[in-house]
Image: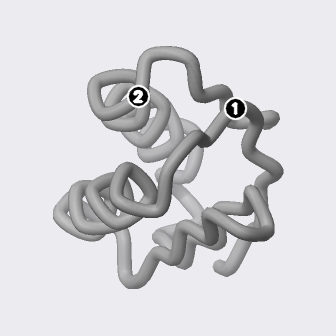
C-alpha cells in the first residue's frame, strides 16, 4: 500500500536523503521517498503492519532531524 504524509520543519536535502535511506531499511517497507522541496514522505509498505512501520519511521526521522514532524 502506498501512502503520502506531509512533513514539517525538514530543513535540508541531505537530511531528507538520510531519512529516505534509513526508512528503506525498515522491515516491511518496499519503497520510500522523502522530498525536501515538497516536504513530503511517500512510503510503500505492508498494509497490515503500517501502524507499526510508521512508528519506526517517526523514530528514524527524529534521530536524523529532531525538529522534523511527520503529520500522520
Q: Outermost residue, top direction? A: 66
Q: Which mark is residue 55?
A: none
Question: In terms of secondary structure, where does tag 2 sit?
Answer: loop
Q: Residues within 10 Å of mark 1 (few under 14, many from 20)?
A: few
Image coordinates of residue 18 in percent, x first then y, are 27, 57
* Residue holding disc 2: 65
How many marks the image carries: the answer is 2
Above-or-below relation of 10 to 40: above
Image coordinates of residue 54 in percent, x first then y, are 52, 41
Quadrant location of residue 69? top right
Residue name at image x 49 percent, y 71 percent: 45
Residue name at image x 79 percent, y 68 percent: 38
* Residue holding disc 1: 9
Residue name at image x 74 percent, y 57 percent: 39
Above-or-below relation of 24 to 7: below
Image coordinates of residue 58 in percent, x first then y, are 48, 31
**Looking at the rendering, in which quadrant would you find the C terminus?**
top right
Name the N-terminal-most of marks 1 and 2. Answer: 1
State the CA–CA distance, disc 1 to disc 2. 9 Å
* Left-right relation of 2 to 52: right
Question: In terms of secondary structure, where does tag 1 sit?
Answer: loop
Above-or-below relation of 51 to 25: above
Question: Who is closer to the viewer here, 45 or 24?
Answer: 24
Amino acid at each position: 500500500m502506498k501512502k503520502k504524509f506531509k512533513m514539517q520543519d525538514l530543513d535540508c536535502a541531505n537530511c531528507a536523503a538520510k531519512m529516505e535511506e534509513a526508512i528503506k531499511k525498515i522491515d516491511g517497507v518496499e519503497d520510500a521517498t522523502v522530498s525536501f522541496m515538497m516536504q513530503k514522505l511517500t512510503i510503500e509498505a505492508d498494509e497490515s503492519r503500517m501502524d507499526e512501520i510508521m512508528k519506526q519511521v517517526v523514530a528514524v526521522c527524529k534521530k536524523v532531524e529532531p525538529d522534523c514532524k511527520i503529520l500522520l
